[in-house]
Amino acid sequence: MTRTIFRPFSLGFLAFAAFLAIALAPGIAQEPSEKEAGAAAPSVLGARMVTTAQRGRLILDLSGATQYTIHAVTDPDRVVLELDAAGVEFDTPAEIAEPGLVGRYSVGMVDEGSARAVMFLTGPAKVQQAYALEAFGDQPARIVVDLIPDTAENFAANAKTAAPAASQADTASPDTQAQPDGASTGRPLIVIDPGHGGIDSGAQAANGLLEKNVVLEFAFKLQEYLVESGKFDVALTRDSDEFLSLEERVTLARENQASLMVSLHADSFSQPNVRGASVYTRDEEATDILDKVLAEQENKVDLVAGFSPPDGDNAVVDILVDLMRRDTRRQAYLAGDAVVNALDASVRMRRFPLRKADFFVLQAPDVPSILVELGFLSNSEDTANLNTDQWRDRVASALARGILAYFEQHG
Ligand SMILES: [Zn+2]
C-alpha cells in the first residue's frame, strides 16, 4: 500500500480553545435550589427503570425543569433522588420486571413540593451520571440517573459522607481516565470525523439541506461539549468544506494515536419513513440490507470525488482486518454501546440502534472507531431536527456523555 497523501497534522489541529461554559454535567453538580415554595415546581408524569447486572437507569418524565440532588443510603442500600415537584401523577410498581443492579424502586411525594425516587440496590453501585433534559418535541422534560456497579467500600464511604445536598457523583475523577497512548496532555484524543465535504456533498434533503454541512455543524458542537468536559483532547478530520478520502480520515486517526474515532453522518435511504439515530461498528459480514446499502454508499465516496479505491481493494482491506486487534473491535463495540445508551434517553433512535456494517472508514486496526448516523435526510422529521440548533445541542451533549461514560468504564 503506497498511498502517501498524509496531511500534516499540527497541534493547531487540536482544539484547545476555551469554549463558552456549556453544562456537560458528568455528575450531580446541582446544588439544591432555594425552594420556591413548590409553586412553580413541575409534576412527575412518569417513571421508567431499566436495569441489568451492570447498569441501572431511572428516567423521570416531568412537566417542566426542576432541581434535584442525589445521595446514597445504607441499610438497605439504595440511591435516593430528591427533587422539587408539585405532585406525582402515577403509581410506581414496587417490582421491576427484570431486576438487575436495581431490585426495585419507588417514586412518591415526601413533603409539599418535594418528591423522592428511591432505587433499592442488589449490590454496591455509584451514580455514573445524572442529568436533566429539557422538553423537546413530543418528549417531556426528564431527569436521567445512570448507576453502575461499585465496590462495597466505595459505596459505604459515599453513603457515609453524603449529606443530602452533597454530590457523591464525582465519578469522573481523573485517575479513572484512560491512559492515552502518547498524547502529551495525558488526555485521550477523540478524533471527530464529519463525513463527506467538498465535491462530495453526501446526502441531500428535499429542502436542499446537505449532509456535509449538517455533520460539520454537528461536529463543532460535539467538539465543544467534549472539550468542555476537560477530559479529552479533540481533533476534527476536517473543519471546513473540503474533501478528504476515507483513507486519509483513517490515517489521521491512526497517526495521531486517537483513543476513539467518531464518524458523523446523516445519510438518506430509499424508504422515507426510516428515521432515527443509530450507531455502527464495523463488521464485514453484516447482512441487514439497509446497513449494507448505507455502507456501500459511503464506501463509494472516493470514487465520486475521482479518487481511486485503495490499491488491491479487497486484499488490502482483508489484511487490515486481519491486523485489527480483537480488542480494538471490542472497544469499538463498548464505545458504541455507551453512546447508544446515552443517546437513547435524549433522542429518537432506530430499532436496534447499535448496528454493524462494513464501513470502510471504521477500518483502523488500532483505533476503536464508531460511525454515528444522526438521522436520515430522506425523512422529513429527521431533516427538520437536523436543521434545528436545539436538537443538535441535545444530541451532541448526549453523544459527549456517552463518550465520557465509555472512557470512565472501559477506556
Ligand atoms: Zn454519509
Image: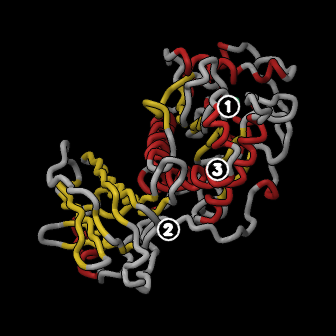
Q: Classify residue 36 by image quadrant.
A: bottom left
Q: How many marks?
A: 3
Relative side of 363 to 168, left or right: right
Location of residue 118 in the rendering, given as x and y in whole percent from the top left corner: 23, 65
- How far is mark 1 from mark 3, CA to CA? 14 Å
Q: Residues within 10 Å of mark 1 (few under 14, many from 20)?
A: many
Residue 392, labelled with which disc? Answer: 3
Q: Residue at x 36, y 65 (%)?
A: 43
Mark 3 and mark 2 in contact (Cβ < 8 Å)? no
Name the colouring of the figure.
Answer: secondary structure
Q: Residue furthest left?
A: 75
Q: Residues within 10 Å of mark 2 (few under 14, many from 20)?
A: few
Closer to us: 302 or 107: 107
First in sequence: mark 1 vs mark 2: 2
Which residue matches tag 2?
174
- How far is mark 2 from mark 3, CA to CA? 28 Å
Ligand 1 is in which quadrant of the figure?
Answer: top right
283 relative to 24, above or below: above
151 relative to 338, above or below: below
First in sequence: mark 2 vs mark 3: 2
Q: Residue at x 42, y 61 (%)?
A: 63
Label 2: element kind:
helix
Residue 377, labelled with which disc? Answer: 1
- Residue 230 in view (yes/no): no
Label 3: element kind:
helix
Relative side of 273 to 113, left or right: right
Residue 402, labelled with which disc? Answer: none
**In what quadrant of the picture does the N terminus appear?**
top right
